[in-house]
Image (tube, helix red, strand yellow):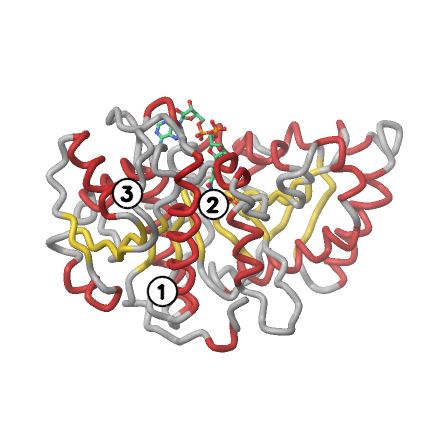
Amino acid sequence: MTDVGARGTGPASAPLALSLGEPAGVGPDIVLAAWTARKQADLPSFFVVGDPGCLADRARLLGLPVPIREAAPDAALGLFDTAFPVVPAGPRTTAAPGHPDATSAPAVITSLDRAVDLVLAGTASGLVTAPLSKAVVYDAGFPFPGHTEYLAARCTPLGGPAPRPVMMIWSPLLAVVPATIHIPLAEVPAAVTTALLVETGQIVARDMRQRFGLAAPRLAFAGLNPHAGEDGTLGREDEEVVRPAVAALRQQGIDATGPFPADTLFHAEARTAYDVVVGMYHDQVLIPAKTLAFHDGVNVTLGLPMIRTSPDHGTAFGIAGTGRANPSSLIAAIRLAGRLADAEAGNAGVGARAAAG
Ligand SMILES: NC(=O)C1=CN([C@@H]2O[C@H](COP(=O)(O)OP(=O)(O)OC[C@H]3O[C@@H](n4cnc5c(N)ncnc54)[C@H](O)[C@@H]3O)[C@@H](O)[C@H]2O)C=CC1
Ligand SMILES: NCC(=O)COP(=O)(O)O
């Protein structure tokens, strides 16, 4: 694993590195659309790491006049205004849009590996990942549930402990963190421990302060059971696991509250009382987040010594290569990564919910 201690200190004006993700999905469509929208959306500069042929094929299919230029990472900044810089990496892909193919896995993984190399070396100021097909990379032996866990492994110092990665889905309307991520629902009650919730709350509070510039972030914890357990009559976990975690965080000076019934935690008035909801499992918090702001949502990985964002959606095979893919979530992800990089370089934090605009 890479020695994180060796990470460079590139200025925030270094471009962002984008991994290309699944070639049969909408990744190439939205990446091309984001570069096309770079001026009107006032995006920070970025380059793609991956197969330039895949992007060129998709541009041709979509009729987009995007001048794709193979480039070294340090040439990308100078090119970005006039051409789309692509740092070649990995084999040529052949999967047709909408038809995922196991042969793409080496290209997908190499694109991600090389993009992370460049971020850890300080050549790029942050990572933005286009969606990959978990099935395609799992079949090729990719040993991680998703980018989130892969990045924690990549950020593990030589001989040191792995950082704990925390997934946050962020939008101007709502920011949520699932305390457990990609595990079966049946395993959730055992996986939700007081220690896990305390550690999650600490990471969220720290990154909201340091990366998002919130002086005193307000964390609302959702309960696990209906009505947050109804005083223990609908399940004991809320009283015995979640409440002690909230109390421990409060003792540490973190503005944590809850557990709250999840069904009434996401309406407009409730959302004014917190900055982030920490939920107990994936769908509990990703459903409200994607329902409220599917096209503005950004997946941000907290807890790592690098910046990583991505769109909140997946490969959308049904619309890949049709011109119907909406690039807004990727555009929001690029914009947020740029602002987080600026904040890391010492400029102002991005604020709780203001950075999407
Ligand atoms: N960060 C990542 O790499 C992620 C990868 N995935 C992967 O994506 C694959 C497909 O997942 P699904 O559950 O089907 O979710 P999905 O997000 O790909 O699609 C869900 C629905 O939203 C629509 N949609 C998605 N993105 C859109 C866009 N940009 N514009 C317009 N409509 C859009 C799709 O057409 C579909 O109707 C799976 O392999 C999953 O693991 C899913 C989420 C994140
Ligand atoms: N449901 C969110 C998702 O699948 C994204 O996972 P990751 O690849 O960002 O870890």
Whether ligand 2 has any atom under 8 Å from the Cβ at mark 2 is answered as yes
Instruction: Give the percent coordinates (x, y) of residue 350.
Output: 41, 58
Using the image as rendered, state which of residue 270 and residue 141 is in the foreground: 141
Which residue lies under the disc numbered 1? Answer: 125
Pointers 1 and 2 in contact (C-beta within 8 Å): no
Residue extending farthest top: 318
Disc 1 or 2, which lies upstream in sequence?
A: 1
Rounded to the nearest whole Å, what is the CA distance between mark 2 and mark 3?
A: 16 Å
Which residue lies under the disc numbered 3? Answer: 31
Task: Please name the amino acid that badge 3 sits on.
Answer: Val
Pointers 2 and 3 in contact (C-beta within 8 Å): no
Q: Mark 2: which secondary structure?
A: strand
Disc 2 or 3, which lies upstream in sequence?
A: 3
Task: Please name the amino acid that badge 1 sits on.
Answer: Ser
Rounded to the nearest whole Å, what is the CA distance between mark 1 and mark 3?
A: 18 Å
Task: Please name the amino acid that badge 2 sits on.
Answer: Asn
Q: Mark 3: which secondary structure?
A: helix
